[in-house]
Image: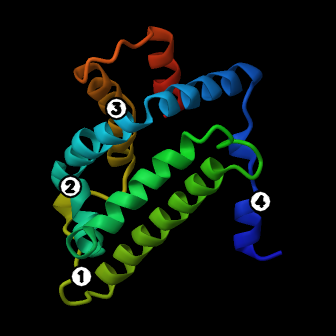
Amino acid sequence: KSLIDKYFNDQKYFQFTPEEKASLERASVFFNIHMTESTLALAVRSLLKQYAAFKSTNVLTYTKLLPKYPYRRIIATMQFVMDVMDPKAFEPDGYGIRSIQKLRLVHALIRNRIEVNTLKKVPGMEWKDEWGKPINQQDMIFAVHTFSMEVIHGLKASGEKLDPADIQNYYHAW
């Protein structure tokens, strides 16, 4: 098997207790009941906050994904969230597992590309130290926060009455 096959077949990080599985299932049901409002909250709250974060948007500018293809970036992010919130997301062949694995791989490739270009001093492709490490843990925590709490805040702002247990399950899913 190739290294990439081994990577995608390794699901040890997607083993959940029965309680965790039940919580993920309830989070999926919650998201899918509120899908229209949730995706709207992702578009007008979550993504806007992420794109306003100076340090993390440098990666998107550097890779040309946001300035050249903003619609692709937005659709890809929305698809990622929908895959993770799919009712069968965490089954062995679930969309959520594959999407998470792909995103982790893409992030690693982009970090490597930035490091290599910076080390080689490719003109116009230098990464500035004041931007911090590309796609770092802090930036990813912020993104997860916006996928979870900004959606919840958006639903509440739209007048949705939310059960605290649903909020907890959705938050824990992210």
Mark 4 is on which residue type? Answer: Asn
Question: Could you say where residue 67 lies in the image, as x and y percent from the top left?
Answer: 20, 71
- The residue that appears at 28% across and 19% down in the rendered structure is 156
Q: Distance between the Cα atoms at labels 2 and 1?
A: 16 Å
The disc, 4 or 1, on the residue closer to the chain's N-terminal end is 4
Tag 2, which secondary structure? helix
Q: Is any atom of residue 65 visible in this view?
A: yes
Q: Nearer the viewer, residue 97 or 120?
A: 97
Q: Distance between the Cα atoms at labels 2 and 4?
A: 33 Å
Q: Which mark is residue 55?
A: 2
| Label 2 Cα crowd, 10 Å radius (few <14 / some 14-19 / many 20+) | some
Q: Quadrant of the N terminus?
A: bottom right
- The residue that appears at 74% across and 50% down in the rendered structure is 11
The disc, 2 or 3, on the residue closer to the chain's N-terminal end is 2
| Residue at the disc numbered 3 | 151
| Residue at the disc numbered 1 | 125
Numbered disc in front, either 4 or 3: 3
Numbered disc in front, either 2 or 3: 3
Numbered disc in front, either 4 or 1: 4
| Residue at the disc numbered 4 | 9
Mark 1 is on which residue type? Answer: Met
The disc, 2 or 1, on the residue closer to the chain's N-terminal end is 2
| Label 1 Cα crowd, 10 Å radius (few <14 / some 14-19 / many 20+) | some
- The residue that appears at 40% across and 39% down in the rendered structure is 144
